[in-house]
Amino acid sequence: MLSHWTCIGQFSRQTLSETKPYTCYVDARRQVYSLNMTVQRRVISKSPESSAIEKKIKRGNAQRQASSWRGNVSTLLLLIGVTGLLSWIYFTWTDDFTHTLVSRGEVLTQPRVFTVECSEDYKKYKIFPGCTPTKCGRAISDSVVTLEEAQKLRRLAERGLSLAGSDGGASILDLHSGALSMGKQFVNIYKYFKNEIRDVFTEEDFELYRDVRGRIQKAIAETFGLDSKQMYLTKPTFFSRINSTSAKTTHDEYWHPHIDKETYGSFDYTSLLYLSDYGVEFGGGRFVFMDPNSNRTVEPRAGRVSFFSSGSENLHHVEKVVWGTRYAITVSFTCDPDYAIDDPSLA
């Protein structure tokens, strides 16, 4: 008689292609054992005590299942509550801690001025009465530069920056020093493109630039109660072109928070003239004042001028541009004549 293991071995050697009926012989001892167990199971009957125990077991299982279900429901309700609370906090934080000083869709007929307390930064430098900030803040105006003038200045920037440009997302053109982004470095546009420069710019371009600079200077003086003759143009003053290309050098990382007075030293007043429209020609790229309890944003609009005192009372950054191209001019002023620069000229 074949053993049980012989049967298993034969079955494992059978292939799918075999069609012959397969016979498996089982150990006689196993048959006897199986028969005895069957008889014993049939003889055993349930006593009243065992029935009561089984009922208790079933009742306990049911209670545990109900308790587990209630626990799952409680956990679910808690998660829903927490999610709702987090959502409320997020949207409340967004509404309460980020404010738009001026939106792109607004057209300001009068300057919008926000006064803030001056920082101690200016005490670290030589004081120039009548110019060094004692009244600090920020202001936005749509009446200093016309849309047509902004469009002309943008075309000037496009022509100059078309000669080169940064490998990263931020390129500059400084008409004063001649600095132009090229790859991962800068070149002097007046020397590098000496023979072609008059085909790129005209005297009218530079005349418009000087005129606009003078009007911005006057607007700052009137807003902060200064004598404009005691304010001087200082470096860096430049056109900027920003797009969503990834930064390749630290010069492309324009989005870091900073304080102009600490970064440049000579700055007392900073201004920006926007040459393109937020939400129409580019996304992101808003100017953000970072106050202790909130962020306050300015949405660029072609022809809009934003200006502010340059100390730590106006910590700020520019949001990353996520699509399109943002054009602007940074024009900066100092009270120290030792840091003054001349207006640019083609001569």
Image (spheres, helix red, strand yellow):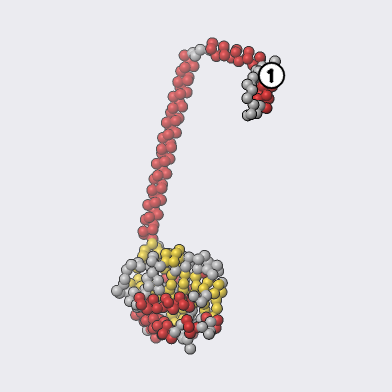
Residue 4 appearing in the image: yes
Q: Nearer the viewer, residue 343 or 3?
A: 3
The residue singled out by tag 1 in the image is 3
Viewport quadrant of the N terminus:
top right
| Residue that protrudes farthest toward the bottom in the picture | 347
Is disc 1 surrounded by few (<14), some (14 to 19) or many (20+) residues within 10 Å? some
Q: In the image, 254: left or right of 32?
A: left
Location of residue 137 (image quadrant): bottom left
Residue 81's spot in the image, x, y percent? 39, 45
Query: In the image, what residue occupies the spot 63% across and 21% down?
Result: 21
Query: In the image, what residue occupies the spot 64% across and 26% down?
Result: 18
Residue 178's spot in the image, x, y percent? 51, 81
Q: Nearer the viewer, residue 308 or 140?
A: 140
Q: Is residue 120 above or below residue 26?
A: below
Query: In the image, what residue occupies the spot 47% across and 23% down?
Result: 57
- Kindly identify the amino acid type of the residue bearing the numbered disc 1: Ser
Residue 63's spot in the image, x, y percent? 43, 28
